[in-house]
Image (cartoon, rainbow, N blue to C red):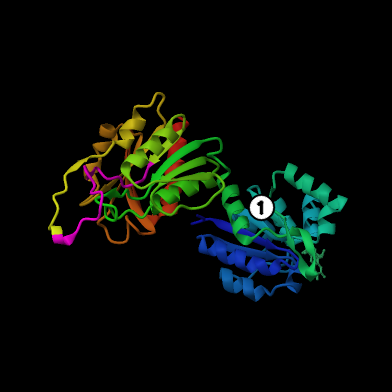
Amino acid sequence: MLGGRSVLLGVTGGVAAFKAAYLARRLVESGATVRVIMTRASLEFIGPQTMAAITGSPPYTELFGTETVSPHTELAAWADVIVVAPATAATMARMAGGESDDLLVATILAFTGPVVVAPAMHTEMWEHPATRRNVTVLAADGIHLVGPVPGPLAGGDEGMGRMAEPEAILEAVIAALHGGDLAGWSVVVSAGGTREPVDPVRFLGNRSSGKMGNAIALTAARRGAAVTLVTTAPAPTHPRISVVPVDTAAEMAAAVWEAAAGCDVAVFAAAVADFRPAEPAPTKLRRADGPPEIRLESTPDILAGVAALQPRPFLVGFAAETGGTAAAAGKLTAKGVDVLVANDVTTPGIGFGADSNAVTVFTAGGSEEWPRQSKDAIANRLWDLVVRARSH
Ligand SMILES: Cc1cc2nc3c(=O)[nH]c(=O)nc-3n(C[C@H](O)[C@H](O)[C@H](O)COP(=O)(O)O)c2cc1C
């Protein structure tokens, strides 16, 4: 999600500062390199050693008197995104006024990228006209505000002003970084492996886990797209993903065809059975009856059905190959897709069930090898490619 990204976390002096430690850990777990600026007041609430242990480097606290000549400009040049969590009323006031007399606000003013702010304070402070004014100014300046939310506050109080949960702040950081470049897109993704009934309890299936399709759906939603995820597998939750659970190739075909009409991009990451038992047994097959003869018939060609739509969406196909990806080269034109992503599922550590993948990507312009990386990273790279291709 945040692999290779540099995230600067600003921690200010509120009780919710203890949650900044968990946010830092989630940022690190998401692949980001994290540096921390702590305001002097925040040091009253959480120890710098905690943040150092989680991020691997000691927090920055001072504008002057450090070994670094110009810490605010150096940190601003290093960061891809700044997130202030928790953000006190005082820090938001300084940000709104451009008062760069501490390291955090000086760095924010020297920074040209996205800034995410997660306010946290008592309800009275949040509702005070001064805070209202500052929030309006920050929003107009393009700051991404996340929360606060209603709930229990420090000292046993209850009301609006509680910091958004770290997971929500993490999502806001991801969304701010990608700038919502898929906003307004409607996307259909198929995922998982289909199951074709042999009898009421048995099926012909395959080893697809749905992880690649899930990563494609989730990254698209995070980048602003409205996603329909047609899947046989457990699906990720996101406000912009609507899940259509299916089981068989025929169910998947019906759901994909319905969703694909009028969509912008369709991605076929599901492993769909080519054949299914022609006459599934109505009752469980019994050992005593001996091995059954199972006659197979073809399943609907989901991709061909979407490729025939007028106008048709931008099409991304996946090809699971065994013994190298060269065999996939001809499928780009044979299947009539704009992008074909091929992976060798017999390579250990990639493909079915794994968290990483290595793929060969075929387009009309040629082919590219994307070496082993997380399925999230592959998915983001794929969307970068689709954005470029659709803008030509
Ligand atoms: C116990 C305690 C809790 C506080 N909690 C908050 C808070 O949740 N939100 C807030 O805006 N200020 C809170 N304050 C006030 C800030 O610490 C104070 O405004 C400080 O100057 C903020 O500095 P900073 O924004 O540079 O970190 C609290 C103060 C105390 C003593």
Q: Residue at x 36, y 32 (%)?
A: 306
Q: Position of residue 205 (x, y in %)?
A: 28, 52
Quarter of the figure with the C terminus: top left
Quadrant of the image occupied by residue 60: bottom right
Residue 228: within the magenta? no
Q: Amino acid at mark 1?
A: Val
Where does label 1 land, which residue? 116
Q: Is residue 80 visible?
A: no
Q: Is residue 18 left or right of residue 99?
A: left
Q: Position of residue 226 (x, y in %)?
A: 52, 40
Q: For this rendering, which residue is in front, 38 or 92? A: 92
Magenta segment main secondary structure = loop
Q: Is residue 285 left or right of residue 74?
A: left
Quadrant where ligand 1 appears: bottom right
Rendered position, 361 above or below 20: above
Q: Is residue 160 left or right of residue 190?
A: right
Quadrant of the image occupied by residue 329: top left
| Mark 1 element type | strand
Q: Is residue 111 visible?
A: yes
Q: Residue at x 57, y 42 (%)?
A: 180
Rendered position, 100 above or below 245: below
Q: For this rendering, which residue is in front, 157 or 133? A: 157
Q: For this rendering, which residue is in front, 183 or 66? A: 183
| Count of numbered labels shown in the rendering | 1
Quadrant of the image occupied by residue 159: bottom right
The span shown in magenta is 268-288
User: Which residue occupies the extreme right position in the image?
Assistant: 129
Q: For mark 1, does the 10 Å Cα neighbourhood hold few (<14), some (14 to 19), or many (20 or more) residues?
A: many
Q: Is mark 1 within 8 Å of ligand 1?
A: no
User: Which residue occupies the extreme top position in the image?
Assistant: 310
Q: Position of residue 13 (x, y in %)?
A: 76, 66
